Amino acid sequence: MTRSPTETALAGRILDAFASLTDEQRAKATEVIGMALDLRGVPRRLGELWIQTAEAAAFQAVVASRFPYTGEEAETFTEAWEN
């Protein structure tokens, strides 16, 4: 599966944006995101999990763009994984 140049560029921008945050800015972002997601009274933890998930997804998109694979390769991997 190959990633589009736009998807890869966006993923890179997301990673850059999070990397450029100071500790204070990241803590504030965590707080704001967490408050928006809060359902159980743990907004700071939810915010941090959301940021970590966004970073991980962006990282996966960047890595996938560097190592494109075909459907056949994916099928071979899946078969090997199942056996």
Image (cartoon, rainbow, N blue to C red):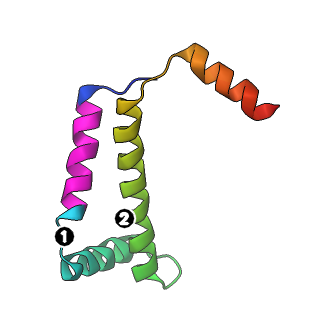
The residue to which callout 2 is attached is: 51
Location of residue 11 (image quadrant):
top left
Point 25% across, 52% down: residue: 14
Q: Nearer the viewer, mark 2 or mark 1?
A: 1
Point out residue 71 in the picture as x, y percentages from the top left corner.
56, 16
Between 68 and 8, the residue placed more toward the observer is 68
Depicted 66 relative to depicted 53: above or below: above
Main SS category, magenta section: helix
Between 76 and 15, the residue placed more toward the observer is 76
Mark positioned earlier in the residue sequence (2 or 1):
1
Point out residue 39 in the picture as x, y percentages from the top left corner.
50, 76
User: Label 1 crowding class (10 Å Cα cut-off): few <14, some 14-19, many 20+?
Assistant: few
Q: Is residue 56 magenta?
A: no
Range of the magenta residues?
6-18
Q: Secondary structure at mark 2?
A: helix
Point 40% across, 73% down: residue: 48
| Amino acid type shown at disc 2 | Ile
The residue to which callout 1 is attached is: 21
Point out residue 20 in the picture as x, y percentages from the top left corner.
17, 65
| Amino acid type shown at disc 1 | Leu
